[in-house]
Image (tube, grey):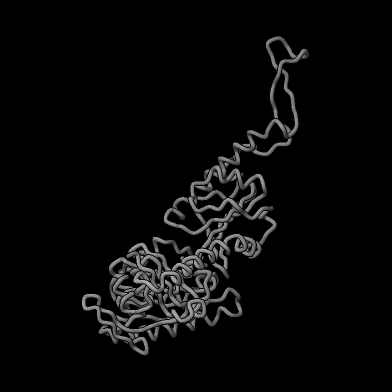
Amino acid sequence: MDMLERKDLRELIEERDLCVSIYMPTHRMAAEVQQDPIRLSNAITEAEKRLQEYGLKVLEAKSLLDPVRRLLGSPFFWRYQSDGLAIFISPNLFRCYRLPSKFDELLVVTRRFHIKPLLNLFAADGLFYILALSKKQVRFLQASRYNVMPIDVEEMPKGLADVLKYDVYEQSLQFHTQTSAYSLPGKRAAIYHGQGGGTDKTKDNIFRYFKQVDKGLQEVLKEEKAPLILSGVDYLIPLYLKANTYAHTLDKGVVGNPDELSDSDLHLRAWKIVESLFLESQRQDFSQYLNLSAGPRTSGDMCEILTASYEGRIEILFVAQGMNRWGSFPVDRGELTLSNEHEAGTEDLLDLAAVQTILHGGAVHLMKPDEIGDHAPIAAIFRY
């Protein structure tokens, strides 16, 4: 599986060239996965046609799409799928992400990448992480509201034994010495005792283990803002919080032995913790929009919102999920032209507004059309 980080999203947003964006649902079960390469092959064929509409010659279009075409013949690639596949290719880069999000089939060819379907992973009910901790092993999971997938972090230890190597870290008897009447002159007798004497050393070893786990995650999470939920027995979670440096780690975790829980079980329990956090943020922001809707700081006008997005004036943008508005908006002229379908020279204007909002530090909420109601497909709160 692949991890999509905020820096990856920014890289896609900032690309400006002839760009092909492909989204499609994928399957994890062997019986269903056979249809996925066929679906991608059809998308490649259509992408070649659209690239030619932009002026590329047949061989140029085929050459641009060669990295995608090579995926068709890779059994290993198709064997390890998540719930959705997102592919981005331009003359400058090629990115492919297997993600825990069920995408609708979509092909967009335009002068930038189409990223709106990804915003579910960064919006109000979007991305969160789960770190399952035990002395035996550590698991790191990336999740959305409906899906979860494991992420392999190369620099993270696999368990406590991986950190201690040859140390003896969990002995039922500990050794120490003390003066004894039965010891030889100048010597100290060996005394053995139970668990109590080793408590501090054991905690020190676990803390060292957790510091290395945290260090391994630093590179992965350094630009992230998504919540991290811990899972572990009751005494391990507070100990990890002391070692933790990721600012968005929640104090409340999934208490219990995670080794006894599947990824799906962890996902279900973790979602119960973050659900209110996610949805409350969205509700508060939209309530603010409704309260301000009679004044100049809000708008549902597409042209006004697009202009404000380029100027960096949008504080919060609300976009209807699953909807598109094709057209063109040359910002230097401020002229909005709408189209009934995606064709050469058009782009999804909802996506364009979202991209510009993110680039200028604004927040974007993807909402169901009925949640936005009469304000669909787009609404905004301006900074000024």
Q: Which residue lies furthest to the front in this view?
A: 294
| Left or right relative to 271: residue 260 | right
| Left or right relative to 194: residue 245 | left
State which quadrant residue 349 falls in. Answer: bottom left
Q: Residue furthest top?
A: 185
Return the residue nearer the eye: 116 or 22.
116
Return the residue nearer the eye: 106 or 241.
241
Q: Where is residue 27 in the image (x, y as percent from the top left)?
A: 56, 76
Q: Is residue 372 above or below residue 274?
A: below
Q: Which residue lies furthest to the left in this view?
A: 332
Q: How many marks?
A: 0
Q: Which residue lies furthest to the bottom in this view?
A: 340
Q: Which residue is drawn at 42% across and 56% down?
A: 223
Q: Where is residue 79 in the image (x, y as percent from the top left)?
A: 55, 72
Q: Residue at x 43, y 75 (%)?
A: 319
Q: Which residue is drawn at 52% across and 70% down?
A: 76
Q: Is residue 53 above or below residue 142?
A: below
| Left or right relative to 170: residue 227 | left
Q: Can residue 59 be seen in this view?
A: no
Q: Is residue 126 above or below residue 106?
A: above
Q: Position of residue 179 (x, y in %)?
A: 72, 15
Q: Is residue 338 above or below residue 362?
A: below
| Left or right relative to 317: residue 384 | left
Q: Position of residue 103 (x, y in %)?
A: 49, 77
